[in-house]
Amino acid sequence: REQILRNGLKENFADVQVSVVECPDLTHDPFNFPVKGICGKPRIADVGGVPYLVPLVQKDKVYDLNTVAKQIELPGAFILGAGAGSSRILGVNAELIPVAQAESEQKPAVNASYTAQINPADGGCLLEKYSNKYSDCEFGLLANLYASQGQPGKVIEVKANGRTGRHNFVTCMRQIIEKCYGDKPVGIGGTFVIQKGKAKIHIMPPEFSACPINTDEEMNNWLHFFEMKAPLICQPVLISRDPGFDLRMEHTHCFSHHGEGGHYHNDSTPDCVQYLGYFLPAEVLFRIDRPKESHRVGRD
Ligand SMILES: [Zn+2]
């Protein structure tokens, strides 16, 4: 399996290494996660969806990471991924970069998530630690989450330097896995660091769109795009194939320690980019509050 990933990535990156290693201690820099690893009962949750954001927002769509942890039968789960902030709490629309250990009977929640929003002062990125202002675990509209017991253990380490292909790091891995496993859906989550280079990142505007957004072009005109610099710590959730649950195939949000973060599209410096990631396939997928009416807009 490592060979398949290695060979596939070599078609898209100049220099690739794939190996199974002990998960590094993720309480250390640059991750600073509240738990050591991403192992133990790995699972994926796809909550809500883009149809709750566009064509017009449904502000009543609010969720809680603690509740999700119970729904996926893993109270106390360590959760990483990509979602939207709760506009009810934040007062604005924002990107959420979930990094949280949900509450359990033994322990209250540790919410180390970040929010990325448009800075009203200068239109730039405003990245904040969620727990600096809030003590809940709420989010809104949609999230793609990778959950585990947060334990140490064996993970797949991927190093990929110098992008030669067109697709981003996550899409490349997803396509390799789809090609290998065909109809069988394989979901993967974890964390990777863009160690060198810059990346194209979007942040949603603070106000939801008053006029309906019906196309990808309208969506892209609505979003704010930035070029952000490494190191960026990214939380991907990907699934190779949708077995008919209206899933988001991939979704990656990132944070940094220099005030930048948001939704990852691709690196913008293919020649010098360096990726280092730790991944694990999920054992189970949960689809929570699937929209009854759906569309394909805004899934990049
Ligand atoms: Zn996103």
Image (cartoon, helix red, strand yellow):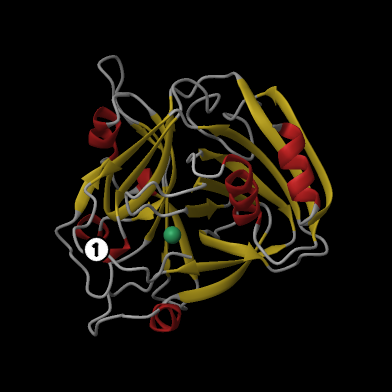
Q: Position of residue 83 (x, y in %)?
A: 38, 53
Say which quarter of the image contains residue 213. bottom left
Q: Residue at x 75, y 49 (%)?
A: 9
Residue 12 vs residue 95: left or right? right
Q: Position of residue 251 (x, y in %)?
A: 47, 54
Circle 1 Cα neighbour tier, 10 Å, few/some/many (<14 / 14–19 / ≥20): many
Nearest the camera: 161 or 248? 248
Nearest the camera: 172 or 31? 172
* Residue 137 can be seen, yes or no: no
Nearest the camera: 276 or 290? 290
Residue 82 vs residue 87: left or right? right
Q: Kindly identify the amino acid type of the residue bearing the numbered disc 1.
A: Tyr
The relative height of residue 95 versus residue 131 in the rendered view (above or below) is below
Q: Judging from the image, what secondary structure is the residue with disc 1 in?
A: helix
Q: Residue at x 52, y 23 (%)?
A: 39
Residue 288 vs residue 24: left or right? left
Residue denoted by label 1: 52
How many labels sit on residues? 1
Q: Quadrant of the N terminus?
A: top right
* Residue 147 can be seen, yes or no: yes
Classify the position of ligand 1 by quadrant: top left, top right, bottom left or bottom right: bottom left
Nearest the camera: 61 or 248? 248
Q: Residue at x 53, y 53 (%)?
A: 254
Q: Position of residue 238 (x, y in %)?
A: 50, 47
Q: Residue at x 51, y 20 (%)?
A: 151
Most distant residue in the front direction:
183
Most distant residue in the right direction:
14
